[in-house]
Amino acid sequence: MTGARPSVTWSLAQWLAWLEAGPRGGIELGLERVARVAQRLALAPRPTVTVAGTNGKGSCAQVASDLGQACGKRTGLYTSPHLLHFGERIRIDGVPVSDAQLVMAFQAVERARQDEHLTYFEFTTLAALWVFETEAVELRVLEVGLGGRLDAVNVVDADVAVITSIGLDHMAELGDTIDAIAPEKAGVARAGRPAIMAMAEPPRALRATLERIGADIRHPDLRVTPQALELAGWPQPLARLRGCSDALQRNAIGALLALQALGIEQSILVRHWPTVAESFQLPGRQQRRGDLLLDVAHNQEAAEELVCALQASKLAPCFLVLGMLDGKPVEAVARTLAPACRGFICVDLDSPRAIPASRLAERLRLAGVAVSGVAATVEKGVKQARAQSTPGSTIVVTGSFFTVAGALRDA
């Protein structure tokens, strides 16, 4: 790391500004540096579920956390990125940690870091693990940030790995085919420990890699119906998660089976499942806010899920406010969303990685997709969409966590 050393008087905002500056904000895959710092932090082993995949990681991790809490386990949940406040990434029993706790965690990691270079994600992952250590959680649920094998989260040996659906994303770092990406996701599994493939049809490369690792491979025998989830070996059908797609139901069952693999009795899980299923919600995933539908979809598979939801709820066609980051499959996302869309409003985002709205609009037009407007902010984009919509219409805000965050702040 470069730059001045942090001060003991720094606020959370100062810490985050320091972490986001310069090369610390980049991607640097590898575990050696993180492992050395983790060893200095003296983190004790704790029951851990690690969730990897392209889509559905966040929902799977959230269900595992909710269900763990319902079963009486003091649960620590680590996810990324956040929408409005960094504390959303690190939660104890569903409650984001305080600014003071985050500052103490950052101070602890900085002391242990010595002269090691750590990226933003590596530093904050270690901070989350330190919080879980000091809070003496009984269950850790960790969502992988990028890939799996070389992601900072993989410094922890997971007791159970859950792998959700795999698609084409982060191709510059992970590869440009499913056969290349799947082994990276499988890297969170450990020999002799359960690895749950929470998807309908696992890629051959995923299963082959898990076999090479020597993991205890599990693929749920699950029938998803419009009324319930029928899981082989369970005494009764399980309730569907309210308002969620079939793919997300499979993610949720992956979380359920992960907790069973950790030793929670089936009868206890069955007792608490209905409450978790009924109350489940994940900010930024098909989230309603007045006339807005907010969804962080930023790859083709997630866009397909969003279109299915819009068509099933008879909300399509509608106007879409779209903002995306550089490196994302813009054309594939836009073509996927186009059948559900009356027009796109392209917006600038509050991120140095954002594609300028004018350039985004140009790429959509070149891809044969209609663009109805360009705006300097998400708020202005929503206003444009409202002006072009009929009263009572739903407006979709999508393309990135930054796009959804802009709507939550301003629109």
Image: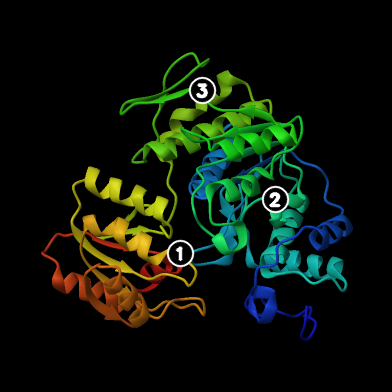
Q: Is residue 379 above or below residue 222?
A: below
Seen from the viewer's position, the closer of residues 129 and 159 is 159
Which of labels 2 and 1 is toward the front? 2
Q: Which mark is residue 401?
A: 1
- Percent x, y for residue 403? 40, 69
At 76% across and 29% down in the image, what residue appears? 192
Q: Amino acid at mark 3?
A: Val
Secondary structure state at the residue bearing disc 2? loop
Please state which amino acid type lies under the numbered disc 2: Arg
Tag nearer the camera, 3 or 2: 2
> Is residue 118 shown above or below 50?
below
Do callouts 2 and 1 mark residues in contact (Cβ within 8 Å)? no
The residue beneath circle 3 is 270
* Structural crowding at the residue carrying mark 1, measured as other residues with C-alpha within 10 Å and reported as few (<14), some (14–19) or many (≥20): many
Give x and y (percent) for residue 341: 22, 60
Image coordinates of residue 407 in percent, x first then y, are 36, 69
- Res 149 label: 2
Dot 3 falls on a residue whose secondary structure is helix
Q: Is residue 95 left or right of residue 315?
A: right
Q: Is residue 177 left or right of 275 when viewed as pictured?
A: right
Tag 1: amino acid: Phe
Mark positioned earlier in the residue sequence (1 or 3): 3
